[in-house]
Image: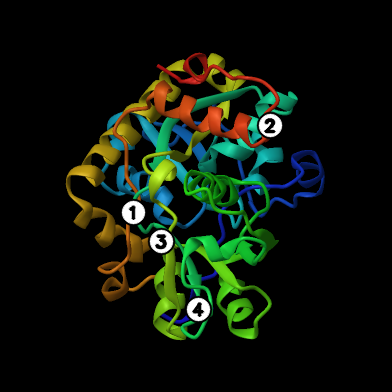
Amino acid sequence: MPLRRLRRSRSGTKRLATLVAAAVLILVGCDSGGTPHSGDGRQQLTVAALPLTDSAALYLARDRGLFAKEGLDVRIEPVQQSIQALPALLKGQVDVIASANYVTYFQAYEKGTLDLRILAEGVRIAPHMMDVLVPKGSALKSPADLAGKKVAVAVLNNIQSLTLNAILDARHAGRPVYRQFLFPQMGPALQRGQVDAAHAVEPFDTAIQGELGARVLLDGGSGPASGLPASGYITTADFVKKNPKAAAGFRRAVEAASKLAAEDPATVRTELPKYTKVTADQATSIHLPAYPPTADPSALRRLIRLMRTQGLLSKDIDPAPLLVK
């Protein structure tokens, strides 16, 4: 799987306020979402999404007619980082952000940047959907060897470092030093010796192993990371208040698609080549995340507790009132 073809990166931020102020939106021709209607009377919604496995339910819901069944005309605008779409969401130019990592958006909610509402869950962490990879000749032989070593993550202080720290803490192993590299840059950084290891997600995980012969030092979906919510479909309280029918319909459509993805992963593997650079052959070997058919406040509380433990939140957040019914 050529690395040059995999140009995707997950969202996140080390300093949320700085990135929000500096973010450049890559959306072109967005409507002031939520109010326009198409010729057949369906309400138009604009959704910003990363072309990753996280967004599979979104594309399935569109292509299987689940949004149309709810009276919605969903238009998907690809972005490279979900944080890039936050200014447009706040201005009402985008109605929903898909593939939105919870760590960043819970931080935004706590800071008062965003009056967050969660329409539906995106994915939860599953075995080998992300791995800590080392070069085939690396002297690192066990997770304990990562202490003090340089590990590439896509964004500092986000879901990757959060979960890897938790896994290492559970093993009573020392933590590494994190270095920020976009996912497509991780393979070259590993090859050049800029980092000792790379914490890569699919499909980059499989690509780096295939091209460089890198080996898995640690399953990033193991231990305390297993089953942890990673991303969701987020919007604003104002959008939900003004568009309760559309918000509920969107939730039902995505949850129906997530149920389909969970029960029949082949549907996801068939869908991936339609909106990513992954080929049909490559899609058969990628490790998929888990697609929860319904949002679970208790699962989100696990994530929030972990964020509190590692200092990424200063106070508890109750996720239940943030979930759209």
Q: Nearer the viewer, residue 45 or 25?
A: 25
**Residue picked out by circle 4:** 3
**Residue picked out by circle 3:** 275
Between disc 3 and disc 4, the foreground one is: 4
**Residue picked out by circle 1:** 127
Q: Is residue 177 above or below residue 246?
A: below
Between disc 1 and disc 2, the foreground one is: 1
Marks 3 and 4 sit apart, C-alpha to C-alpha, by: 17 Å
Marks 3 and 1 sit apart, C-alpha to C-alpha, by: 23 Å
* Label 2: which secondary element: helix
Kindly identify the amino acid type of the residue bearing the numbered disc 3.
Tyr
Q: In this view, does 207 lie above or below 324?
A: below
Residue located 28% across and 40% down the image: 257
* Label pair 2/4, CB-CB below 8 angstroms: no
Marks 1 and 4 sit apart, C-alpha to C-alpha, by: 22 Å
Q: Quick one: label 2 or label 4, which is nearer the N terminus? A: 4
Q: Quick one: label 1 or label 4, which is nearer the N terminus? A: 4
